[in-house]
Image: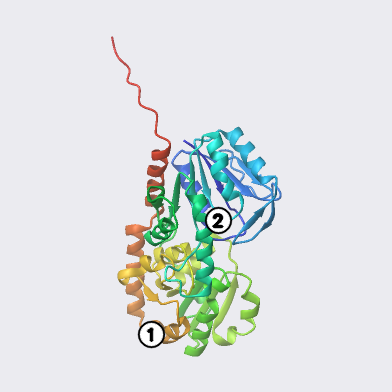
Amino acid sequence: MHVAWLGKKSPFCGNVTYGREVTNALLERHYRVSFLHFAQTETDVRNWPDCPEVTLPYLYKSQVYTIPSLRSSRVFTEALHQFQPDLVHASLTLSTLDFRLPEICAALGVPLVATFHPPFDSKFRNLKSSTQFLTYQLYAPFLAHYDRVIVFSELQKDLLVRLGVPTTKVAVIPNGVDVQRYSPGASDFKQQVRAERLFVYLGRIATEKNVEAMLKAWKAANLSVKNKLVIVGDGPLAGALQSFYGAADGIIWHGFEGDEQQRIRILRAADVFVLPSLVEGLSLSLLEAMACGVACVATDAGADAEAIAGGAGIELDTQAVTRQLRLLFPLLSEHREWTALLGKKARQRVLERYTLSRNITQLEQLYAELVPLPPVRLSHRA
């Protein structure tokens, strides 16, 4: 089967990781994959002879959304004419092209699948979650015309169905992690940063991630110097926050880390992973930390609460995150057996529900519903 994948390669975000992991896995399972993404030049390409690429022109691109140029629809359509794929899978980049895809693919007679990434908070407890709800309201009428829409949790499915997307079109396929790469193992990163107990945040430094609430709690907890909090990532709030929270507080600003092996090295060294988000989908960073056997603390935004429910992590309410973490940080610092047990349970949860292999098998089943394999012709002997 030939899959035309419309996705994202930059700037780095969960959508980029999702597209890389899934298309790599499809290629390993002998699918043909063509990769279409927004780029101004040909420099940002994978250079795989078995994975041709097309760059789509754009006017603006960020981690959150993309503004395509007027030529992007024509370039995309011409690419589909050239590739003649069996199916189009759009890992939606929040752009106006998303709204035209059903029309384009219907005209070409090609099935269309979407993965819908926008984070959410099903309880709508804050302004940011209300903004995300507007995104769901805007997209729902168009998603109803896709052949299938993949989301990461039953909560997301229920929300889209309530907004008018037929339930038969919505498939729940959670994010998956390569549990061979992301696994417990030796790391010298803790020694490198001179920590006895290492807490890690990995993600964007942006409003919806609620990083400042975590930093306030860390500073207020006033832990001993043996504890360090490493912030891995970058974003619009990074500069302002670094002015108030720094080395004197035991906080290390690592910055963006593009090397996957280095991110794994950091996670393997961590004692506790913290995700204080106001809204989420299903965080790949959380699942990667869990797969590495790290004790995880996360808010109940999006589907993250499902991932750590039942003792696989510690769940926070998105309200009063600072107060909750202020109480938890000293406990997590001192009780090493507790965090070790949480880490083991986290790893087991990923093995049970969130492996990349399981994810791809479910995706293959969905593809087969839309592109049935031709019948096997039996030869008849005389």
Q: Residue at x 50, y 60 (%)?
A: 136
Q: Amino acid at mark 1?
A: Leu
Q: Which sits in the foreground, 162 or 86? A: 162
- The percent position of residue 14, horizontal first and vertical second, equals 52, 60
Closer to us: mark 1 or mark 2? 2
Q: Residue at x 46, y 81 (%)?
A: 321
**Of the numbered discs in the image, which one, if any, rests on residue 18?**
none
Exactly how many numbered labels are in the figure? Answer: 2
Q: Quadrant of residue 197?
A: bottom left
Q: Quadrant of residue 325?
A: bottom left
- Classed neighbour count for the residue bearing mark 2: other residues with Cα under 10 Å, few (<14), some (14–19), many (≥20): some
Q: Amino acid at mark 2?
A: Val
Instruction: Relative to 328, say whether 111 is above or below.
Output: above
Q: Residue at x 62, y 80 (%)?
A: 242
Task: Name the residue that disc number 2 marks.
Answer: 16
Task: Name the residue that disc number 1 marks.
Answer: 331
Q: Residue furthest left?
A: 382
Q: Secondary structure at mark 1?
A: helix
- The percent position of residue 270, horizontal first and vertical second, equals 45, 73
